[in-house]
Amino acid sequence: MSAVERMTITMPAEMAETLRRTVATGEYASASEVIREALREWARSRDTERQELEALRAAVKAGLDSGPALAADQVFAELRARYTAKS
């Protein structure tokens, strides 16, 4: 088991009351359990955000590396011409 370190935290009164109520209902055995779970969820969320950001960066890079962009007016003109020709 990893080493345990004791910390003191400060939070708004509303959060502290919610934490106490949660422990009092028996959902958690201690305030420390609540905080540990909250930190685990926060870490998972951060990891997910980092992965999504990396995927977005890769998509932007792929787009930039794919070649020069076309003007929207040119693209729409070509599409109109194609669909008009098919009609």
Image (spheres, rainbow, N blue to C red):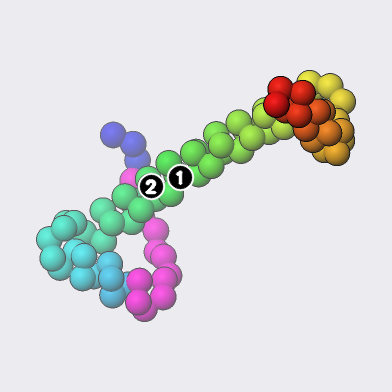
Point out the residue furthest to the front here: 87
- Quadrant of the rendered image containing residue 20: bottom left
Majority secondary structure of the magenta segment?
loop
Closer-to-camera residue (86/23)? 86
Magenta region: 4-15
Asked whether the residues under the numbered discs 2 and 1 touch, taking CB atoms below 8 Å apart as contact, a structural biologist would say yes
Say if 20 sits above or below 53 in the image: below
Identify the residue at image location x=43%, y=41%: 44
Q: Amino acid at mark 1?
A: Ser
Depth check: give the residue in front, 55 or 11: 55
Left of 82 or right of it: where is 11? left
Magenta-span inclusion, residue 69: no
Quadrant location of residue 70?
top right
Residue corresponding to mark 2: 41
Q: Quadrant of the C terminus?
A: top right
Q: Position of residue 83 (x, y in %)?
A: 72, 28
Question: In this rendering, is residue 29 above or below 12?
Answer: above
Q: Is residue 35 visible?
A: yes
What secondary structure is found at the residue carrying circle 2?
A: helix
Residue 69's x, y, as percent? 85, 30
**Mark identifier at residue 45:** 1
In this rendering, position of residue 19 left or right of residue 39: left
Relative height, residue 74 to residue 33 (above, below): above
| The one of 15 and 53 positioned closer to us in this rendering | 53
Q: Residue at x 72, y 32 (%)?
A: 60
Q: Is residue 5 visible?
A: no
* Above-or-below relation of 16 to 47: below
